[in-house]
C-alpha cells in the first residue's frame, strides 16, 4: 500500500513507510503529495518536463531508400568497367560490369546495348532476366559462351576500332555509357571517347568504379585484359 503525505496549513507531517523508508514533504497550501509503492514522490500539480525525454518514435520510415551493409544508401551506380572488342576469334569480346555498392543491385529488365561509331543500332548486347543481380563489390562478365569466365551470355558484334555501348535500367534510363575510338554520332558516349582497345587487349577504367562522365579521362588501354578482376 502506498504512503500518503499531505501538507496541512503550513505545518509538516512526516510518516514512515514499511522498510524504514522516511519521506518528508514540506509545502504551504499546496495540493497533496503521494508516495507510491516504489517510494517515488508524485505531485499532480507539477507538470512533467518533456524537454528531457528522448524524441518520440512516430513509427514511420522511408521505405524508398535501402541501406547497404556499410550504412550508406544502395544506389543504381553500376558501371561498365572494362571491355574487349576483338581477339584471335570472331567472338573474342566481353563487357565487364562493376558494382561499387555494399549491397547487391537487382538487374532484372536491365540491358547493355551497342551503337556503331556513327550512332547506328548494332546487334551486340544483352538483356538481363528477372531475378538477375550483381553482388556487392563484384564484377560481372558478359561474353559469348565460349569465353572463359563468362557470367552471362553476350551477343557479339562490337567493331574493333570504334563504337559505343551503354547500360540501361529497367525503365530504359541510361546508367552508364562508353564510347571508344573515333565516335562521330550516337548518344552513348560520355564526354570525349576512350582510346580504342589494342589488338587482343582491352580498355578499362583507371580506377574500378570511378566515373567522371568523361570516357577519355576514365579509361586507358590494357594489353592484358582482366575480366572478372580488378583492373591493374
Image: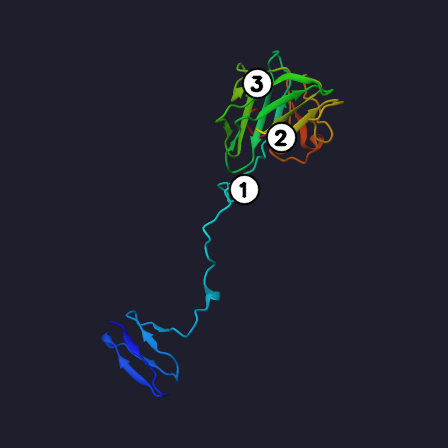
Foreground: 161 or 36?
A: 36
Q: Quadrant of residue 114?
A: top right
Residue tagged 3: 154
Q: Secondary structure at mark 3?
A: loop
Q: Is residue 210 visible?
A: yes
Indicate left or right for 220 with 32 as reference: right
Q: CA distance from mark 3 to mark 1?
A: 30 Å
Q: Which residue is mark 2?
A: 173
- How far is mark 2 from mark 3, CA to CA? 20 Å
- Asked if residue 232 can be seen in this view, the reply is no
Q: Is residue 41 left or right of residue 75?
A: left
**In the rendered image, which quarter contains the N terminus?**
bottom left
Nearer the N terminus, badge 1 or badge 2? 1
Identify the colour scheme used. Answer: rainbow
Q: Which residue is mark 1?
A: 73
Dot 2 falls on a residue whose secondary structure is loop
User: Which one is in front, 89 or 129?
Assistant: 129
Q: Position of residue 188 (x, y in %)?
A: 68, 26
Question: Measuring 65% from the left and 35% from the top, which residue is drawn there?
Answer: 211
Query: Which quarter of the rendered picture does the C terminus lie within?
Result: top right
Question: Which of pointers 3 and 1 lies earlier in the amino acid sequence?
Answer: 1
* 21 shown above or below 120: below
**Horizontal and vertical percent for residue 48?**
43, 69
Q: Hey, which quadrant is residue 171 in on the image?
A: top right
Asked if residue 110 lies left or right of residue 165, the reply is left
The total number of labels drawn is 3
| Labels 2 and 3: the sequence-earlier one | 3
Amino acid at each position: 500500500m502506498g504512503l500518503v503525505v499531505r501538507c496541512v496549513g503550513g505545518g509538516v507531517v512526516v510518516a514512515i513507510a514499511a522498510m524504514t523508508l522516511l519521506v518528508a514533504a514540506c509545502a504551504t497550501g499546496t495540493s497533496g503529495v503521494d508516495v507510491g509503492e516504489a517510494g517515488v514522490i508524485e505531485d499532480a500539480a507539477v507538470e512533467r518536463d518533456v524537454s528531457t525525454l528522448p524524441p518520440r518514435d512516430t513509427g514511420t520510415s522511408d521505405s524508398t531508400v535501402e541501406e547497404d551493409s556499410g550504412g550508406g544508401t544502395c544506389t543504381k551506380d553500376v558501371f561498365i568497367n572494362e571491355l574487349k572488342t576483338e581477339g584471335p576469334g570472331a567472338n573474342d569480346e566481353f563487357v565487364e560490369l562493376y558494382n561499387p555498392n555494399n549491397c547487391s543491385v537487382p538487374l532484372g529488365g536491365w540491358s547493355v546495348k551497342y551503337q556503331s561509331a556513327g550512332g547506328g543500332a548494332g546487334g551486340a548486347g544483352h538483356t538481363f532476366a528477372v531475378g538477375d543481380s550483381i553482388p556487392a563489390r563484384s564484377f560481372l562478365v558478359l561474353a559469348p559462351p565460349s569465353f572463359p569466365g563468362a557470367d552471362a551470355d553476350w551477343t557479339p558484334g562490337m567493331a574493333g576500332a570504334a563504337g559505343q555501348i551503354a547500360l540501361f535500367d529497367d525503365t530504359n534510363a541510361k546508367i552508364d555509357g562508353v564510347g571508344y575510338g573515333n565516335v562521330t554520332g550516337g548518344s552513348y558516349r560520355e564526354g570525349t571517347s576512350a582510346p580504342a582497345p589494342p589488338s587482343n587487349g582491352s580498355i578499362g577504367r583507371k580506377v574500378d568504379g570511378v566515373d567522371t562522365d568523361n570516357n577519355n579521362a576514365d579509361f586507358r588501354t590494357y594489353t592484358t585484359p582482366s575480366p572478372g578482376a580488378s583492373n591493374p
